[in-house]
Amino acid sequence: MPKRKQPMKTPSVLQTLLTQSFESERSLRHFSTLASQELISLLASALGDLEAPGNSFESTKNSLERAIFLSRNLRYFSSGARADLSLTDLSQLVLDCVQLREHAFQKKNISLEVRVESSVFGLVDALAIEQAILNCLDFAFSQSEVGSQVAFNLQVVNQGLQFSVGLEGASKDGAGEKHPLQPTALEQLEASNLGLLGLTVASVIAEAHSGTFQCFKSKEEGTQLLLQLPFDARMNKQPHLFREKRRHQRVRVDFSGVLSSGTGQSFPGRVTVLSAGGCFVALSQDVVSKLSVGDSVSLSIQTDADHLLSIPLARVANTHPTGENSGVGLEFLELDLKSKNLLAALVKAHAS
C-alpha cells in the first residue's frame, strides 16, 4: 500500500502570527461589545431625558458628550490608532485637555496639580494623543475619592517625553504590592469597569507612536499612569522652564521673519506656529545648530506688506536641529501694548 502523506505542519512563525491575529480579533470583539453596551445605555438615557417633562437638557448634553467620546475611543482602538504625525505644541495640548476636565474635578473637590514644561513641540498625532490624555484624566477622576489629589505632569526624561498622572493613596478597588496593570487584558474587564477601556485605547495610541503606556498600583503610592513617547530628532530635548496653567491659543501661520541672536547675527526664517506667548520659527539646520535652549533673541515678523511685528526679547525654549521641520520654539519675554494687540488679532484671525 502506498504510504499516506503526512499532513503538512504549519510553520511555527505562521502559527504564532495566526494566534496573535485570533487573539487581536477576540479582543476587538470584546472591546466593541462593552463599548456598544455603554453607548446604548448613554443614548437611551439621553432619549429618556428628552422625553421627561421640564428637562433642562443638561443631563442630555452630558450623555451625548460621553457617547461621542466613547465612540472616538472605539474608532481609535478598532483602527489601530494609525498615527497621522504633525508638529504639535504638546505643552498647550496638555493644558487644553486639563481645561476640558478641570471643572469636573473641582465639583468633586479633587485637587488637580498640573506641571507642564514650557513650549514642548513634538511630531505626534495630536487628536490621538489628546484622546489618550483625556482617557487618563477620566480614569483618574473615576478612581479618586472626594477631597483627594491628582498630579499631572508633562516632562522630558532621558528616554523621551513622559505624560504622567498620579493618584494619591489606594484607588477604589484597592491595591496590594506595587505591580503593573495590563490594560490590554480585555477578557478580564466587566462593563462596570469601563475606565480600563480608556487605558487600553491609550496603550494602543502609545504603541502607534512607538511609545509605551504603563499603569502601576501600590498601596503606599497609589496609582500612576505613564505615557512615554520616544525622542524624535525634531522633538525638544532640554527644556527646564516649567509653567503653571498658562494658556495661549496657538494657530498655524506662514510669515517670513528674521531672528537676531545675542551676538548680533541675523537669520531669515518662517514663522509657522504663533500664539500670544510664543512661536515656532522654521530655520535651516545650520542656523539651529548655532542656537541653544535659554538663548536670548529678538524677532521681526512680516505679517503682511505693511505691517512688521517686532519682538524685542524672546527666549529659545527648545530646538529641533534635524529633519524637514528644523527650527526653534520661542517664548516671548517682552512685548509692548501695540505688539500684544497685533498678536491677539493675528491669532484670532487665523483661528477662525
Image (spheres, rainbow, N blue to C red):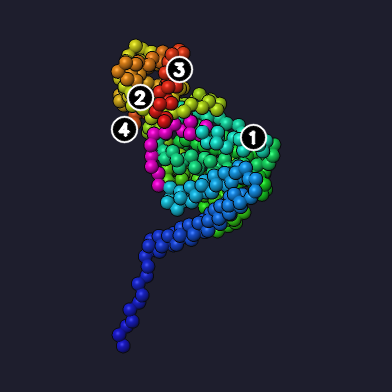
Residue at point 32%, 83% (across, down) = 3
Amino acid residing under circle 1: Gln
Q: Residue furthest front?
A: 53
Q: Which residue is mark 4?
A: 324
The residue tagged with tag 3: helix, strand or loop?
Answer: helix
Q: Residue furthest bottom?
A: 1
Residue at point 40%, 26% (across, down) = 349
Q: Which residue is mark 2?
A: 271
- Residue 232 % position (x, y): 39, 36
The residue tagged with tag 2: helix, strand or loop?
Answer: strand
Amino acid residing under circle 3: Lys
Inter-mark Cα distance, 3 to 4: 30 Å
**Of callouts 3 and 4, which one flags the residue occurring earlier in the amino acid sequence?**
4
Crowding at dot 3, Cα within 10 Å, few <14 / some 14-19 / many 20+, comes out as some
Inter-mark Cα distance, 2 to 3: 17 Å
- Residue 282 % position (x, y): 34, 26
**Of callouts 4 and 1, which one flags the residue occurring earlier in the amino acid sequence?**
1
Q: Which residue is mark 3?
A: 340
